[in-house]
């Protein structure tokens, strides 16, 4: 808080800040989501806000956009105290918000989405004509080209995001808040977004960027505020800080950002996938002939923008989706269709699966932790009391031990899964799968929605499993994660593998191009 | 079948299609705003009873119409409170209101008039009488078009013309006005409307209100124009047929006109078994003809009309999220 308080103290003499929050507090029942938050954002700057999940970033921004009312505290816009009881007031105050999940009407055109709620009069024709004019000006000014007559559902995610930005600019927003804007973008799209944001800043707009990606903070922001457990732990100039310092501020202790791993020592081939095809329920081909091998003691990372077939690959390997082609595990062909192609037979073949969507596939959120730990392994002999009954006491004791080893907090086996934070939920799933000592671990988005402290822990577990001579298939949309963990990288695009790369010799640019389907000079 | 018979059937089609059209457009407004309304039937029934009773008691069809609109609006309001304010299940609310309407209409009519749940027959100023359009008789001698104008287009109750005019009006409201844009948006993605600073609840209540008014017109037409008075369960499933027509029309106004008139045509055929027998050269049992509109309804609802994509947020209460 000290820096926040200091900057607001200088405010009387300096030019007014675009946004100034003073002593904002907000509680949801017993949970104090924001505690006495103060922050001052100078006009014409890009201000980053970072913090772990649940640190209170989204709550703070929701207060600024009129979704919640603060219990106490004051909001100053351009030096004027402003009440923001609803989104309409926020828009009037010149605040525009680009949500992580876009608020667009899918079967409307770009123009219709842009004017929605900001129409000129009761008839549409005039609003549409005006929006068309304004949009063409804006797109020229800020590299924000989108076809105004295209339907949203026909646009790529990157273009949809531009529509959200255009919506805010059309409402003459001076202050733009972006919540985790790059989560769904390819590296090239993210670069384009940053160019747009820089352009907006140069025109005097103020931008608040909420993200958990330290790299983005370092790359584009002028100042960065760090939140931890509902409080503002500090605001620093980006030029005067480092990722290590920010991570430490976020977590409250030293964090190892680089994965500490030695050279791989690959052994025999564990998994061999040959010409794998998968069709979805509409008959659309999602995997278009994939072939690769993974050896013991090796991590193969699959990079790619979400939705290019990675999920289907995991599901086919995990026995959830039907496929054609061959999957050979330790020299034996696995069934790809029919009743015997299921998770149970896959586990018997030595495959463990940490699914991408842990809340739907990995856990039953209303079930207690010990019940979740039993799933898939409920027939294990050590969990049986006799021929009929399960030994729940043994299961609970086993769960407690696993929670201890995997640092799950709080280590209470009888708590329902939904009561744990995202990171701790993930640790429960990872503990369940890794502790079975599988020959092959399939792991999808291991750190999605996971705190930076837990990320470090999960990465260590994955590397430890590799060092124990196991094969690992890692699927992640986080390029950093792929680059730091993998021993080999394959890039997936449109259901096909674009090629393999060595993490030591490749770079983000090359991988980004492959992720966008561009293969220049593929060996 | 001669030309005269065809005109008679088309004339009936228009008469019988009108309540369907009102109800279908009513459903269109509600569902386009994301509120499923299976209670069109109940609202029509309420409106029919209220308008029939008040028209008889006052001798004025206009007061009857107002009462019908009010009765339907009350039920629409209940559905709105249940499904918008309290975020209840829209199907359950609609079904409950249908049951309530089915019972309360008969109860009230029986208590007022003691005629077994009917209202006494209406006549004169207590009914919407047929309007002869200008030049109907003058133009009758014109070949083909003359009789079509005089016998099919002319000679209906006022509400029939109102219903037809509601089609372009609905189209215009939906696609050319700010209200229509917001209404369509709230049925597709209420979060987009909410973050744009527009009230989701306000829009949805407005839509539900329009639904109430249009169902009121449908019911009042049934009791004071199509028939002369209210009778127990007189809507006979027209609310559900209108829903089927709405799906058939894929929630679009002009297509709704076509779908409703198709259903109306089948109902009109059921009134003329002799003609059907003459045309197909096979004697078709009358009960089968009576069942035709309902069979068509089942076919439509079972998805035989191709893929109909309902408004994406349909049926889901809107809960604001961060």
Image (spheres, coloured by chain):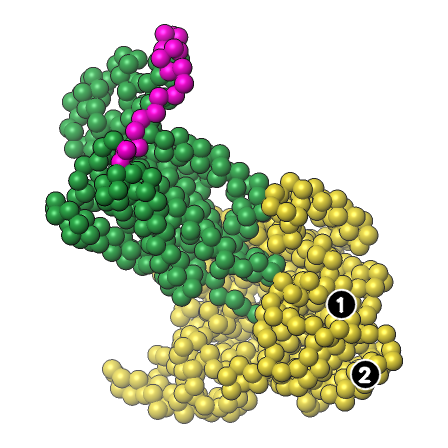
Chain colours: A yellow, B green
Disc nearer the start of the sequence (2/1): 2
Is residue B297 among the parts visible in the rendering? no
Main structural element of the magenta stretch: helix, strand or loop?
Answer: loop
Which of the image's four quarters has the C terminus of chain A?
A: bottom right
Q: Is residue A521 left or right of residue A411?
A: right
- Which residue extends farthest right? A13
Residues B185 and B12: in front is B12
Q: Which residue is mark 1?
A: A207
Q: Could you say where residue B123 lies in the image, as x and y percent from the top left?
A: 22, 32
Q: Is residue B255 left or right of residue B265?
A: right
Quote the CA–CA distance across marks 2 and 1.
18 Å
Q: Residues within 10 Å of mark 1 (few under 14, many from 20)?
A: many
Residues A208 and A51: in front is A208
The number of discs equals: 2
Residues B259 and B7: in front is B7
Is residue A392 among the parts visible in the rendering? yes
**Badge 2 and badge 1 in a common chain:** yes
Q: In which image quadrant can residue B26 be found?
A: top left
Magenta stretch holds residue B226: no
Residue B298 vertical placement versus A96 (above, below): above
| Letter of the chain that mark 2 sits on in the rendering | A
Q: Which residues are magenta?
A: B125-143
Q: Residue at 27%, 12% (x, y): give it.
A: B2
Residue A208 vertical placement versus A149 (above, below): below
Q: Is residue B236 left or right of residue A405?
A: left
Q: Could you say where residue B138 lies in the image, as x and y percent from the top left?
A: 38, 10
Q: Could you say where residue A22 lies in the image, as x and y percent from the top left?
A: 71, 82
Q: Which residue is mark 2?
A: A7
Residues A65 and A306: in front is A65
Query: Closer to us: mark 2 or mark 1?
Result: 2
Q: Secondary structure at mark 1?
A: strand
Which of the image's four quarters has the N terminus of chain A?
A: bottom right
């Amino acid at each position: 808080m000290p820096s926040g308080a200091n900057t607001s103290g200088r405010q009387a003499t300096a030019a007014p800040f675009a946004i100034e929050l003073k002593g904002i507090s907000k509680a949801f029942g017993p949970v104090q989501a924001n505690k006495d938050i103060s922050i001052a954002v100078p006009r014409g700057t890009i201000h980053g806000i970072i913090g772990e999940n649940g640190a209170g970033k989204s709550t703070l921004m929701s207060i600024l956009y009129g979704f919640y009312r603060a219990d106490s505290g004051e909001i100053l816009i351009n030096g004027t105290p402003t009440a923001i009881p609803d989104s309409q007031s926020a828009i009037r105050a010149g605040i525009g918000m680009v949500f992580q999940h876009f608020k667009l009407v899918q079967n409307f055109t770009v123009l219709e989405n842009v004017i929605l709620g900001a129409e000129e009069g009761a008839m549409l024709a005039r609003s549409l004509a005006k929006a068309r004019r304004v949009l063409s000006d804006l797109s020229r000014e800020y590299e924000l080209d989108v076809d105004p007559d295209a339907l949203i559902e026909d646009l790529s995610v990157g273009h949809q995001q531009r529509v959200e930005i255009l919506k805010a600019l059309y409402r003459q927003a001076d202050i733009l808040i972006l919540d985790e804007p790059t989560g769904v973008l390819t590296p090239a799209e993210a670069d384009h977004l940053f160019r747009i944001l820089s352009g907006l800043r140069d025109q005097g707009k103020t931008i608040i960027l909420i993200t958990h990606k330290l790299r983005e903070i370092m790359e584009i922001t002028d100042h960065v505020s760090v939140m931890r457990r509902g409080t503002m732990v500090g605001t620093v100039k980006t030029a005067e800080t480092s990722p290590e310092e920010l991570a430490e501020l976020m977590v409250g202790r030293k964090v190892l950002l680089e994965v500490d791993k030695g050279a791989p020592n690959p052994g025999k081939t564990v998994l061999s996938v040959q010409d794998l095809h998968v069709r979805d329920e509409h008959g659309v081909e999602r995997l278009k002939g994939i072939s690769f091998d993974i050896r013991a003691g090796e991590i193969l990372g699959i990079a790619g923008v979400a939705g290019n077939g990675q999920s289907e690959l995991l599901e086919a390997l995990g026995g959830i989706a039907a496929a054609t082609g061959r999957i050979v595990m330790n020299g034996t062909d696995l069934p790809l269709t029919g009743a015997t192609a299921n998770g149970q037979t896959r586990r018997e073949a030595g495959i463990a699966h940490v699914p991408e969507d842990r809340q739907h596939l990995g856990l039953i959120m209303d079930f207690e932790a010990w019940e979740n730990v039993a799933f898939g392994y409920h027939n294990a002999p050590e969990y049986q009391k006799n021929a009929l009954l399960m030994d729940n006491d043994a299961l609970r004791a086993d769960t407690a031990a696993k929670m201890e080893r995997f640092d799950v907090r709080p280590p209470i086996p009888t708590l329902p899964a939904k009561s744990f934070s995202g990171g701790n939920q993930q640790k429960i799933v990872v503990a369940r799968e890794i502790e079975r000592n599988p020959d092959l671990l399939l792991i999808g988005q291991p750190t999605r929605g996971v705190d930076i402290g837990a990320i470090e822990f999960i990465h260590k577990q994955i590397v430890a499993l590799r060092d124990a001579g196991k094969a690992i298939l890692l699927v992640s949309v986080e390029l950093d994660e792929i680059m730091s963990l993998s021993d080999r990288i394959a890039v997936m695009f449109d259901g096909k593998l674009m090629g393999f790369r060595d993490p030591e010799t490749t770079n983000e640019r090359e991988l980004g191009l492959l992720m966008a389907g561009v293969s220049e000079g593929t060996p | 079948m001669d030309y005269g018979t065809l005109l008679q059937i088309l004339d009936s089609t228009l008469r019988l299609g009108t309540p369907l059209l009102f109800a279908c457009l009513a459903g269109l407004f509600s569902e386009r705003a994301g509120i499923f309304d299976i209670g069109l039937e109940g609202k029509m029934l309420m409106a029919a009873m209220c308008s029939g009773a008040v028209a008889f008691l006052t001798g004025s069809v206009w007061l009857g119409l107002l009462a019908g609109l009010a009765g339907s609006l009350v039920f629409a309001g209940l559905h709105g409170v249940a499904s918008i304010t309290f975020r209840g299940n829209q199907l359950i609310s609609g079904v409950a209101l249908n049951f309530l309407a089915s019972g309360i209409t008969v109860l009230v009519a029986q208590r007022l008039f003691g005629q077994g749940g009917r209202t006494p027959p209406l006549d004169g100023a207590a009914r919407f009488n047929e309007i002869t359009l200008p030049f109907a008789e003058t133009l009758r001698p014109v070949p083909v078009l003359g009789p079509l104008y005089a016998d099919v287009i002319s000679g209906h109750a006022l509400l029939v013309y109102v219903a037809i005019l509601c089609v372009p009006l609905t189209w215009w409201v939906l696609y050319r006005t700010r209200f229509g844009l917001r209404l369509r948006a709230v049925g597709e993605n209420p979060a987009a409307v909410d973050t744009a600073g527009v009230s989701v609840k306000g829009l949805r209540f407005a839509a539900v209100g329009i639904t109430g008014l249009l169902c009121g017109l449908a019911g009042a037409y049934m009791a004071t124009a199509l028939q002369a008075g209210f009778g127990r369960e007189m809507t006979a499933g027209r609310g559900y047929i209108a829903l089927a027509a709405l799906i058939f029309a894929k929630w679009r106004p002009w297509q709704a006109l076509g779908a409703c008139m198709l259903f109306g045509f089948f109902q009109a055929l059921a009134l003329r078994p002799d003609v059907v027998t003459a045309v197909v050269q096979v004697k078709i049992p009358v009960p089968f003809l009576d069942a035709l509109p309902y069979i068509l309804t089942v076919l439509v609802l079972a998805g035989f009309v191709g893929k109909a994509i309902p408004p994406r947020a349909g049926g889901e209460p809107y809960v604001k999220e961060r």
